[in-house]
Image (cartoon, helix red, strand yellow):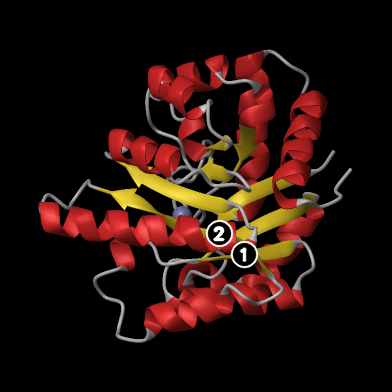
Amino acid sequence: MIFIDSHTHLNDPELYSFLEEEMSYSRENNLKFILVASYDLESAKRAILISQKYPECHAAIGLHPENMQEAKEGDWDEIKSLMQDKNCVAIGETGLDYHWVKDLKEREKQKRLFIEHIELANKLHLPLTIHSRDAAQDTYQILSEHVPEQGAILHCYSYSVEMMEQFLKLPIWFGFGGTLTFKNAKLVKEVLSSCPLERVVTETDAPYLTPEPFRGKRNEPKNVIYVAKKIAEITSLPLEEVTKQIAKNIEKIFHVKLL
Ligand SMILES: [Zn+2]
């Protein structure tokens, strides 16, 4: 059985300082595809370094909406040039985060940067990994007007079943992570139950969102097995079938051979 972490931050200093250790855990647990998502220039450089070193790791290059304000002049140009690296297999993470941003001008800036990421992905024929928080309608509107031609993963999907049905009309996959294992996560469980398995991928978003039974500790890619097990439990499908379908989905999005 093989496992996939379609969104993780081995490039975050918290995990990067334990990279060797993390990679040996992930190999022991048979993780065959790990997408290292960047959020700023330094994390993008580290994502490339990690994917050069470990063949199962691949880089997603982008500027996270939350890191947009701190980015220095010239960072965005350097990030764009890293997108050309052969280890860059996806654009992101990008998207919209309105949780702490109430100012409309700032939200407009996020939208423009998000659209730019989608256009770059289409130009480079790459899929996207998308972060979207408290911005369901705008995310949907942008994605329907600027369709990601090579597909996109809405990582750590947190919106309603109705919204998911809208997104399903587009080439969108849904990333499920640690939140699925939380006791009070009724909505995300409901969403997973109504989502076709052909559109589901597993992720950790490590070092964040640690799944049960490790909640409170630092999250790491190997914990994706607890997410896959939870998906099997919720869908009442054998774990083997779940992991196989998820690997197939990843093969389709990233044009890789895993099975
Ligand atoms: Zn992330």
Kind of residue indicated by mark 1: Leu
User: Horizontal and vertical percent for residue 183?
Assistant: 42, 24
Q: Provide the residue designation for mark 2.
A: 121
Residue nearest the observer in this picture, 50 or 61: 61
Kind of residue indicated by mark 2: Ala
Q: Residues within 10 Å of mark 2 (few under 14, many from 20)?
A: many
Query: What residue sits 50% from the left and 30% below the top?
Result: 180
Secondary structure of the residue carrying tag 1 is helix
Q: Left or right? Give the position of 85 relative to 244.
A: left
Query: What residue sits 41% from the left and 41% below the top?
Result: 145
Q: Provide the residue designation for mark 1.
A: 124
Task: Give the vertical position of 196 relative to 48 (above or below).
Answer: above
Indicate the quadrant containing the C terminus: top left, top right, bottom left or bottom right.
Answer: top right
User: Horizontal and vertical percent for residue 135?
Assistant: 28, 40
Residue nearest the observer in this picture, 5 or 223: 5
Indicate the quadrant containing the N terminus: top left, top right, bottom left or bottom right.
Answer: top right
Q: Residue furthest bottom?
A: 74
Query: What residue sits 46% from the left and 49% below the top?
Result: 130
Q: Is residue 17 visible?
A: no
Residue nearest the observer in this picture, 233 or 133: 133
User: Horizontal and vertical percent for residue 150?
Assistant: 63, 48
Answer whether labels 2 and 1 touch (C-beta < 8 Å). Answer: yes
Q: Residues within 10 Å of mark 1 (few under 14, many from 20)?
A: some
User: Horizontal and vertical percent for residue 241?
Assistant: 80, 25
Task: Give the vertical position of 165 relative to 69 (above or below).
Answer: above
Secondary structure of the residue carrying tag 2 is helix
Task: Give the vertical position of 93 relative to 171 (above or below).
Answer: below
Is ligand 1 less than 8 Å from the beta carbon at label 2? no
Q: Left or right? Give the position of 244 relative to 74.
A: right
Query: What residue sits 42% from the left and 57% below the top?
Result: 94
Q: Is residue 64 visible?
A: yes
* Distance from the alpha carbon under mark 2 to that under mark 1: 5 Å
